[in-house]
Image (tube, coloured by chain):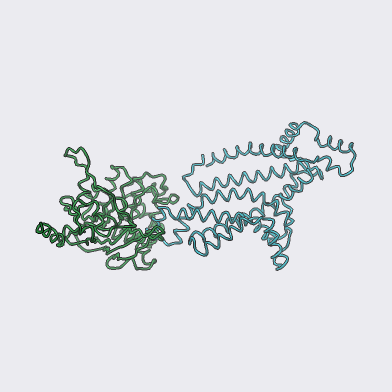
Amino acid sequence: MNSEVVLEVKNLKTHFISNKGTAKAVDGVDFVLKKGETLGIVGESGCGKSMTSLSILRLIPSPPGKIVDGQVLLNGKDLVTMSDEELRKIRGNRISMIFQEPMTSLNPVIPVGEQIAEALRLHQGLSKKQAWDKSVEMIGLVGIPSPEKRAKQEPFQLSGGMRQRIMIAMALACTPEVLIADEPTTALDVTIQAQILEIMKDLQRKIGMGIIFITHDLGVVAEMCDQVGVMYAGQIVEHRSAQDLFKNPLHPYTQGLIGSLPKLYEDQDELQTIEGTVPSPYDYPEGCRFAERCPFSTDICVQKQPILVQYDEDTKVRCWKYTDEWQNSLTRGVVIP
Amino acid sequence: MFLFMIKRLVQIVPVILGVTLVVFLIMQMVPGDSAVILAGEGASKETVEQLREDLGLNKPLYEQYFSYISNVVQGDLGNSLKNNQPVLDEILIRLPVTMELAFFSILITIVLGLIAGIISAVRPYSFSDIGVMVVALLGISLPSFWLGLLLMYVFSVKLQWLPVAGWDSLAHVILPAITLGAGGAAIVARMTRSSMLEVVGQDYIRTAKAKGLKEHVIIYKHALRNALIPVITVVGLQFGSLLGGTVLVESVFAINGLGRMIVDAIRTRDIPMVQGGVLVASLVFVFVNLLVDTMYKVFNKRIDLN
C-alpha cells in the first residue's frame, strides 16, 4: 500500500461560542490519513467526531461554530486558512462527504441525476450531456438497477438505501482523494448496511481514495478500517491499527468500549458498561477527561491533562499509564510504605 | 393532473351556488328598499308598489332566488335596477380594468416580495435584513387607502410625475398597482424570509455546500425552489384580499373597475348588479386558487393532487 499522506489534521479545535459559554466540541484533534487507507473515527454520541468531519471542509454551522486553532492539510495545503473560493473548488472535487441522513441529505425537488451531474459540470467542466451520462454511469456503479430511469427520479421515489447509494455516487463522481463518510450506514437496515460498505470498499479499490469513516459502530470499524482513532470528549485518545486495537486496546476508554461489546461465545448475564457520563463540553476537567470514569485513575490523572504519546511505531495513546511519569509515581508508591 | 382539473372544475359549482345564496340573503337583510330608492324621494306609495311589482321584488324569496339562478345558468345575470341595462354587459366592460389592476398588483406583490425576502434571508440579522423587514412591517401596517392618498400626493400632486387618477395609459396603472400590491409584497417578503431561513438549515443545503456549489446556485437552485412552496400558498391567499382591495383602490384613484361598480351598486341597492359583480369576482378567485394548487405540483412533484 502506498504510504503517501493525503490529509493531515493537526491540533484542530472547533468551538461553539454562545451565551451559555464555550463548548469545546473539537479540542485538539490530530490524525493522518494515507492514500488508499481507511481511517475510522469512533466514539460515543457527542464526542465531537461529526464536528471533526464537518470542520475539515469548514461546514460547521457558523456562527456559533468556529475553528479556533489548528490545521487541516490536504497534500500540505491548509484548508483552514484558505479563501472560500479556493475551498469551494476542493469541496466535492478533491474531498467529498457522505452524510448520516440519506433521507434528508438530498434535495427533495431536484432529480437525483441532476444532483450528481451539477458537481461534474462545476468541477470537471463537462457539458450538460456528458455530465448527465457520467451521472447515470455513477448511479449504475453504486449498484442501482436501471440507472437511466432512476436518474430522472426525485429522492422521494427512492428508498433509503438507494438514496445513500446516490449520495455515494455524488461523492465519488469527481474521483476525490479523500472521502469523509459520517455514519453513512447508521440510518440503514443491516443488510443494506453491508451492501453499502461493500460498495464503498469496492470503489476505494478502484479510485484509491483515502476514507475517513466516522462511526460509533465498532463492528463496522472492524469491517472497514485500517487505522482507528478513538475520540473522547473532543480529543483523540488512541490512534492505532484496527487489528491491534481490537486485540489489545491500550486506553482505558477503548478497553471499556471493546469490553462493552456483547460476546457471542461467552455466557454473559449482564453487559459491561462504562460507569459515569461524558463531561460537559462547556466545562472539561483540568486533568484527564476520562479520569472520573477510569478504573486506573490516580492523582496525576486528575491534576494534569495527558498528551498523545507515541506508544510504538504506529500507535499513539493519550493516557498517563503509558508515560514515564506513571512508572515513576508507581515505583514511589511501592517504596514509601 | 387532468382528472384533478376536472374534479376541481366540478367543485366550483357548489361554491358558486353558495356564494350567490349568501349574497342574495345579505342583500335582502341590509336595510333600505331598492324600490324606494329607485323611485326617488317623494315618490307616491303607488309608484313604489308598481315598481316592486315590475321588478318581481314582492315574490317570495326562494322564488326570486331560483328564477335568478336559472337565468344565471343561461348566461343572463339580469338587468340593472338603475338603468335597466344588462348586468353582464356592464361587467364585461369593468372586468378587464380590474383584472389589469389585479395583474400588475400581484406582479408587484410577487416580484417585490421575493426580492425583499431573499435579500433578507441571505444575510439574516444584517442591516439589509433589518432594513427590509422594517419596510415590510410598514407595508403590512399601512391601510391601502391611506397609502394610495399618500402616493398620489407625493408623485402626482407634488412631483407631478404620474397622473392623479383615471385609467388611460400604463402610467395610470403604476400608483394603484403599488398601493394594492404593497401589503401583499410585505407579507410575501416575510414569508419568503422565514421559509428561506428554514430551508437553508436543511441537510440538503449542507450537501450542496459540500459539493462545492457557488453560493448563488445554492440559493436560487437548491434553496429557493423548496422555499417557494409555502410562498405560493400565501400569494394565492393574497389574491383574495387583493380582489377585496380593488374596491378601495378603485375608489381612491377613480378607476371604473368591478370593485367600484359593486360599491356603487350596493349604495343604490342594485341587487342584480351586486350579485353579478360578486359572482364574477368569486369565479375569478376560485380559478386563481385552482391555478395555485396546480403550481404546487410544478414545484414539488411529491404533492399528489388527486
Chain A shade in the render: green
Q: B210 or A59: which is nearer to us?
A: A59
At which x and y percent is residue A64? Answer: 40, 60
x 59%, y 45%: residue: B289
Q: Is residue B84 above or below residue B66?
A: below
Quadrant (top left, top right, bottom left, bottom right) of the C terminus of chain A: bottom left
Instruction: Tell me the quarter of the picture where residue B215 sits.
Output: bottom left
Chain letter for the cyan part? B
Q: A13 or A162: which is nearer to us?
A: A13
x 47%, y 52%: residue: B226
Instruction: Tell me the quarter of the picture where residue B110 sits.
Output: bottom right
Residue A96 seen by the camera: no
Quadrant (top left, top right, bottom left, bottom right) of the N terminus of chain A: bottom left
- Tell me: A307 left or right of B186: left
At which x and y percent is residue A223? Answer: 22, 49
Q: B84 or A278: which is nearer to us?
A: A278
Residue B245 seen by the camera: yes
At which x and y percent is residue B292? Answer: 56, 47
